[in-house]
Amino acid sequence: MNYADFHRRSIEEPDAFWAEQAKLVDWHKPFDTVCDYSKPPFVTWFAGGQTNLCHNAVDRHLATRPDDKALIWVSTEVDKEVVYSFRELHAEVQRMAAILRELGVKKGDRVLVYMPMIAEAAFTMLACARIGAIHSVVFGGFASVSLASRIDNAAPTVIVSADAGSRAGKVVPYKGLLDEAIKLAKAKPTKVLMVDRGLAKFERSAGRDEDYATLRSKHMNTQVPCEWVDSTHPSYTLYTSGTTGTPKGVQRDTGGYCVALAASMKHIYLGKPGETYFSTSDIGWVVGHSYIVYGPLIGGMATIMYEGLPIRPDAGVWWSLVEKYKVTSMFSAPTAVRVLKKQDPAYLKKYDLSSLRALFLAGEPLDEPTATWISESLGRPIIDNYWQTETGWPILSLCNGVEQLPSKFGSPGLAVYGYNVKLIDEATGKEMTHSDEKGVVMIEGPLPPGCMQTVWQDDERFVKTYWTVLDGKHMYSTFDWGVRDKDGYYFILGRTDDVINVAGHRLGTREIEESISSHANVAEVAVVGVADQLKGQVAMAFVIAKDASALGDQAARLKLEGEIMKVVDSQLGAVARPSRVLFVTALPKTRSGKLLRRALQAVAEHRDPGDMSTIEDPTALQQVKALVG
Ligand code: PRX
């Protein structure tokens, strides 16, 4: 089929289009309406319908492929590999669901998941979906303060965690951070379910902490049927950063998400039942939700869940898995490819990669040298795709399952079906009609199925943060700049807000600033993202010390820099640690006191800051220039 027609139909006849896609999933009760957009910008997909994500991901495959591989857990950290068939996954998920029920979890309750990349994390997510509980996975790399704010927002009945993760062979304990976070949080979980991997000793809080292995042995044969939920029932929340305030809980529905993922497996990710999908992300991020756990399983595919680094024991480890499990679709991030690019390319030639249909990359801009290197080394199509935690699945991509179209270097492709993408002039609010003009990437409402329903418990924040009315139409902002060429291919040019992207991890500079400000000797701080060859961007902090006499010499500056980094490590996690903390006596501000972030970033990247006529103190930028060399 012609993709242009496919896309046009999705926009012009959304009801017919999505009703067709909805046939890809099982419904317990058919829906009455496809799209209800009577209260914009809120949209309801498949109202009246009832379904269950876990049923679609697991149970429905029992009839046709019970012994096919479903979850392949591989850890090069603890040197283990466990394969669960759909039948075995079904049993494990029921056990976990029985445990959650026993611990008091009911439909609509939140279950916070703070876990490393272990199979039990996937069991927990699926078990929540099974009983209609709402999971909220927090990335294992976040530390106690980040975790505490998420606990407070989600107010979970139960938290599921583990003794430790492992990174590069080093044990990374979780439980101490979790205990600290629970202490900091106002909302207290009634129970904490601990998976004890035997990696790190931890203290148990009597009456609160429960042992997974013990409870599992009680429920070896407990049957927990799927709870049929309304299509609009929230399946999960996932926190993500923006410019202001605490991270937002992106809330996802059930029916729309299920349909969107099932359709994306077919049209975008080229997956077929019985095949194997390998996404190298982490369950703490949206890619892990959509394309480690739910998408592949809904599509009847085996999914690989990998704990470890891409270069350990050597740079061939991912490709060895592609060969061993005959991976057909693989999903990773440009940073991971850049890491591999620094290794001996012979590792790529060592394995039979003939099963692989394509490598999908997302999460951050794909630069041309990286794209060329991986495409030549693999000899397989590389498909860049652009999306967000908010959308849950691609906004821009090639939809090769519909029509094979050429890719263009530096472009994540065309607007995906269901997305009415527009480029808007920031100053005038008018749509860019000519090609190659830079504008804000916006999506005309309604957002298609699978995208965020709202901000958890904050409809007003959802509307205020993301939506503007232009020419009487509700428009969702992605907060990204973009251009479109004459063939409809988009190019993403970076964020319009204060979000930075470090190695594909989305971070809010304001959160990092807040954390740094809590150090006793910090008077003022500005954090900006600075281009980095390996990680895409790194965070750089510019600090005005309260007591500058403490910064007499280089050794003193390094000491304070180290202390500040430690504060960020312990509060937010190493993932948010700035690459450098540099000390200045003034920050570039306008005369009205507004921080000139873009100028600061430009100078830190050795670029021209542009028109600086509004700056209060021109020496502020000169200091920065001198520091970054
Ligand atoms: O700035 C865009 C960038 O990552 C942001 C979304 O990050 P996150 O919520 O973590 O979701 C990642 C889902 C893959 C976007 O606003 N981004 C994502 N994909 C691309 C990208 N930038 C350029 N090219 C991409 N393919």
Image: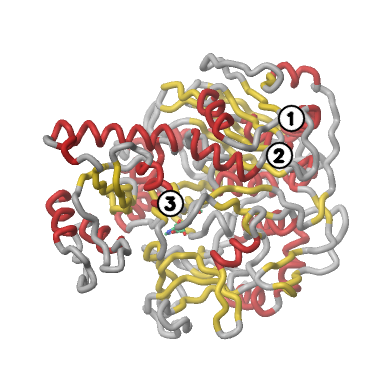
Q: Which residue is mark 3?
A: 508
- Image quadrant of residue 106? top right
* Horizontal side of residue 30 vs 54, given as left or right: right
Q: Is residue 579 above or below residue 537?
A: above
Instruction: Please name the amino acid that badge 1 sits on.
Output: Met
Viewer-nearest of labels 3 and 2? 3
Q: Does mark 1's beta carbon lie closer than 8 Å to ligand 1?
A: no
- Residue appearing at x 41%, y 70% in the figure: 482
Q: Circle 1: is it few (<14), some (14-19), or many (20+) Cα within 10 Å? A: many
User: Disc 2 vs disc 1: Cβ atoms closer than 8 Å?
Assistant: yes
Q: Secondary structure at mark 1?
A: helix
Residue 25: assigned label: none
Q: Secondary structure at mark 2?
A: helix
Residue 606, how many percent across, how many down?
18, 58
Q: Which residue is mark 2?
A: 126
| Label 3 vs 2, first from the N-terminus | 2
Residue 182, how many percent across, how many down?
58, 31
Looking at the picture, tell me which residue is in the foreground, 159 or 371: 159
Q: CA distance from mark 2 to mark 1?
A: 9 Å
Q: Residue furthest right?
A: 29
Residue 377, how many percent across, how many down?
36, 47
Q: Which residue is mark 1?
A: 96
Instruction: Please name the amino acid that badge 3 sits on.
Output: Gly
